[in-house]
Image (cartoon, helix red, strand yellow):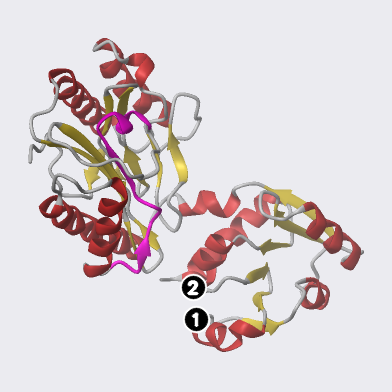
Amino acid sequence: MDHGLRRQRLLERCSELDVDGFLVTRLANVRYLTGFTGSNGQLLLGREGAAFVTDGRYTEQSRREVPDLERFTAQRLADPLLDWCRGAEIRRLAFEAEEVTVARHEDLVDKLPDVTLVASRSVVEGLRWSKDADELVLLRAAQRVTDDAFDDVLDRLAVGLTERQVALDVEMALRRHGADAQAFDPIVAFGEQAAEPHHSPGRRILEEGDLIKMDFGAVVDGYHADMTRTVAFGAPAPELRKIHDVVRQAQEAGIDAVRAGVGGAEVDAVARHVIADAGYGDRFTHGLGHGVGLEIHEGPGLGATTEDVLPVGAVVTVEPGVYVPGLGGVRIEDMVEVTADGCEVLGTSNRELIEL
């Protein structure tokens, strides 16, 4: 990972923001810019150099993970920040408005009387939208683990298992195939429970004829995968079979619409039109997708109200769904890499209706 190049890109944004430096406190952004993986780290970036601040728990870890920056160990960020700002001649310092609390902002104002604090929104996050070659390798690795785990879980499904038991099988399968962690708590929903888009696995027992909706993903070296499949355990009800076919066609249409320069709202509209034409427009109750990377939900977004435009190298989900209370629901989700003239699906798992 070329963290120095990433920091240089942020410095270029500093000129556009009319600031002398940037205080980065959001951990995913700190990791992106430094490689640090601990739970407490801040990056101080200026035109004359950069520094990293953490506490005593991470002195040795930061020495290993952030060898190319000056490092400070402190209990309070404001303590080394004052001296650093003076030494780097920082007069206007950008900070992450969506991360810094009111209390911390008041503390910084008190400790930095000669520095003007400038609120910024989603600056580093915007840099993260387009993935570099190293990031794409890790995203593909996370997807491979997810695909392999899905195959394992299908082999273990049996009448009498509960949603919670299958969710545990998902976690164990991800670990067996090399995941560092789960991207999020898996969604496992049987039968009528699948009508809840984000159902929490419970004690519902798997029965013949149920649809099974499973949404899960692996984390590999900090990068996430996100995939949903809906399979049938035995022969499903005819309407559910129809709904699965509609959702599959909507996803194909959405994937075909993805390419660099297209707005996320436009892609969402293409997939949503397929579902609306089939009579289920009011049952598609969420956006079509979102970016994935160091976080499971990041930009750019695919939704009816977003103004995001897809750049080359972004990795986004395409995940239409139809949810009918009392009957069940279907979602099919894949991550795709945005290219200049289209996109490439990262996963290999079957998107047709699998009947077990």
In the visual, does 60 lie left or right of 115? left
Q: Residue 21 location in percent, x, y?
A: 71, 63
- Residue visible at 17% across and 18% down in the picture: 239
Q: Is residue 241 above or below residue 203?
A: above
In the visual, does 213 lie left or right of 208? right
Q: Is residue 2 above or below residue 25?
A: below
In the rendered image, which residue does mark 1 sit on?
Answer: 65
Q: Is 315 in front, or is 242?
A: 242
Q: Residue 84 location in percent, x, y?
A: 77, 76
Q: CA distance from mark 1 to mark 2?
A: 6 Å
Location of the N terminus by quadrant is: bottom left
Q: Is residue 187 magenta?
A: yes
Quarter assignment of residue 198: top left
Marks 1/2 in contact by CB < 8 Å: the verdict is: yes
- The magenta span reads 179-196
Location of the C terminus by quadrant is: top left
Q: Looking at the image, is mark 1 or mark 2 earlier in the sequence?
A: 2
Amino acid tagged 1: Glu
- Residue visible at 65% across and 83% down in the picture: 71
Q: Which mark is residue 35?
A: 2
Q: Is 260 in front, or is 183?
A: 183
Q: Residue 240 location in percent, x, y?
A: 19, 23
Quarter assignment of residue 117: bottom right
Q: How busy is the neighbourhood of tag 1: few (under 14 within 10 Å), some, or many (20 plus)? A: some
